Image: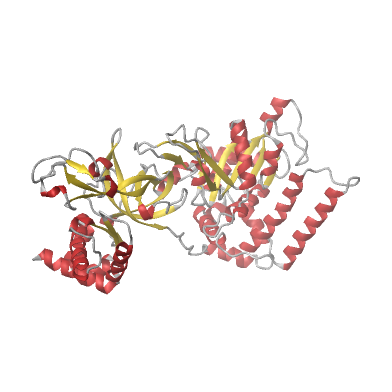
Amino acid sequence: FLYLKMKEAALIYLDRSGGLQKFMDDCKYYNDSKQSYAVYRFNILINPSDVVELDPELGNYILHHPLEAAQVFQSVCFVAVKTLSLIGELQTESQINIVLKLTHLPPLPSYYLDLCEFPLNYTSQRFYMMQGIVIAMTTTTKYTQGARFLCSDEACPLSKGFQYIRVHVPGATESATVRNDFLCHLCSSSLQEDRKFRVLGDKQIIEIITTKALHAFQGYSKNQPFRFQSLSIFLRDELVNKMKIGNEYKIIGIPVCVKTSQTALCIEANSVSFCDPEVPSGISDNFRYLISLTSSSCWKFTAILANIFASQIVPPGTYNLLKLCLLMSLVQTSDHKKELEDCLDILIITSDTLLIDRLLNFSISLVPRGIHHPVSTEVFPTVSRNKYGTGAVTIQAGSALLAKDGICFIGDLALHRKDKLEQLQSVLESRSITVYIPGKKFGDVIDQQMSFPIQCSFWSFVDMDASSRKNAQKPSTLIGQMDYGLIPTNLVEAFGLLINCNESSPCHPLLSVVQHTLKKAMDPEGLLYLASKQFTTEDFEKLLAFAKNLHVEFSLEAERMIHGYYLASRRIRADSIYGSKLSASALKYLGFCILCCSKCTISI
C-alpha cells in the first residue's frame, strides 16, 4: 500500500513540477529517432522541499534511499509510456533508466559531508552535500550506461526480447555492468551481450580538497593543526567538464567505496554548482574612524595604511614602499569577473631574505587564496597516470592554479631550475599554461593538449647578497641596471613591479628591526605597538575583502597623471642622444608606482 501511495505522489509531483511534460518531450525525441535503443535514460529534476511537503514518505525515500526511489519513478514513467503510447519500441520496465537530479539538500548537519572529519565512514548510499576546491582532474573516458543481454540457449524464451537489461548504478564498476559470467534465471545458461545495443556515456574523475586545507599551503597561519584529505568525485554524462581546476564547488552525491590498491571513499556526483564568493560585510569601526579623520586628503589613509601594515612582522614605518605594493597586489585579488591583466606580480631585490619571507608569508594569509609554494612541488600543472586504472590521464593543479584569484608566493627565484624559470617567464607574459599529454606514453593513439588561464599574482624575491657572491660584482644602485646573478633579465622584466629593498638605506633602519626581532623572540604572541592593537589582522582581512570587490574608476586627475607619464617615458626612450639609460623594466616600475598609489587610494 505504501509503495502504491508513493507512486501516486510521484505522479502528482511530476505533473505539478513540469517534470511530466519534460518526460514526454524526451520520449518524443526517442520515438522520433531512427536509432534502436535498449535503454532509455531520463533525468528527472527533484526539489526535495516540494516533495516532502507533498508526501513525507516519498521525500524521505528520495533523500535516504535514492536507488529505491528511482525505481518508484521508473514504474510511474513506464506506465505513462504505455498508457500514452509515447515510445513504440519500449517493451519492458527495465529498459527505462531514471536518474533523479536533486536541486538541493536540507541545510542540516547530517546531510553535510565534512572532509576534515575522521573517520569518513559514510557507508549508507544516500545523498550528501560537500564543498571543495578542484585540485586534479582526469581526461574524459567512456563507461557503459546500459547493456542488453540474451540467453545463449536459443530454445529459452529469454533468448529474445529485452528481459535482461543492466544499467550503471552509483558505486558500480564497469565489470558490475558488463561481464561474461551472468546466468539465465530460467534455464541457468550463460548470458551473452548484444553489443549493438550497448549504450556508452562519458566519465571524468575530479579530486577536491576542503577550503580549510588551503591553510596548510600558507606560511603564516594562526589556525590549529587539523587533518584533511582529498576526495575523488565521479562525474558522468552531462556533468563531465562542468568543473574547472582551481574553482570551488558544491557537490551533491552518493558516497561509494572504490577498490584500487586500497579501498577509497569516493563520491558519485548527482549535481554540481559553482560556489559564489561571500559578500564582504564591511570594514571595522577602527578603519571607518581612520577614514573619517583622513578624508581631507586622498593620500593620508593610504600612507597610514602602508605605515602600520604587518606590524606583527616589521616595525611601523619600515618597508613602507614594499608594504604599499603588497597591499595593492592584495587588492587586485578580485573574487569575480577578474581579468587576466589585473594581476600584479612583484619581484623583490633584497639582502634580508628571512625578513622578506616572513612579511610575504604574513601578507598571503590575509586573502583566501594565498598559497606559499613548496619548492619540492610543482608551480604549474603536471600530468600522471590515473590511479583508478580507467585509462585516463590525471592533471594535477600545481600551486598557480590553486591560487586562483589570489597570490602564489614562489619564494627565492634562485631555488628554481632553469627550465622552471623559463616556464614562469612564459606564464607571466601570456597568463596561461598549456599542458601536453603524449598519447604514446599514456596508451592513447593521439597526443592531446589542454590550456589553463593563470589568474593569480606571483610574488618572489632574489637574494642580492647571494647573487653578488656568485658573480663577484657590486650591483648598480639603479633599478633596471642591476646584476641579478643567475636570474635571466627577461624574467625579471616580466614581473609587474620590481622593488629594491636596500636595507642599508634610511627607509629601513636596522636598529628598530633588530629591536622588534628580539622582542618577538621573547614574546611571540605579544602586540608590541599600539597600531597592532587598534588594527588587528582580522581588520586587515575585512578591509582587503571589501576593497578588492569595489568597482574602481580613475579620477580625471589620475588619468592625466598616468597619461603624462607614459607620454614622457615614450619620448625619453625614443631619444637616441638624450634618452634615458634606464631599462624598460625600470620605466615600467615607475609607471606601476603611479598606478599603485592612485588605484589603492581610490579603491579604499
- In this view, the residue in front, 58 or 88, is 88
Residue at the far bottom in the pictured view: 16
Q: Nearer the viewer, residue 570 or 228?
A: 570
Viewer can see residue 219: no
Residue drawn at point x = 33 percent, y = 59 percent: 34
The chosen color scheme is secondary structure
Q: Residue furthest front?
A: 155
How many circles with numbers are drawn on the protein? 0
Residue at 68 percent of width and 33 percent of height = 464
| The image quarter in which residue 470 lies | top right
Q: Nearer the viewer, residue 256 or 361?
A: 256
Residue 223, image x, y percentages: 42, 46
Which quarter shows the N terminus? Answer: bottom left
**Residue 307 image position (x, y, % from top left):** 64, 52
User: Residue 184 placed where, x, y %?
Assistant: 12, 44
Name the residue: 73% across, 68% down. Answer: 556
Residue 476 relative to residue 464: left or right: right
Nearest to the observer: residue 558 or residue 283: 558
Position of the C terminus by quadrant: bottom right
Estimate the x, y position of residue 432 in percent, counting from the top left: 58, 46
Q: Is residue 364 left or right of residue 485?
A: left
Q: Note whether 31 is above or below 432 in the view shown.
A: below
Q: Quadrant of residue 359?
A: top right
The answer to whether residue 354 is above or below residue 549 is above
Q: Is residue 218 left or right of residue 411?
A: left
Examine the rendering and report whether any part of residue 272 can be seen. Answer: yes
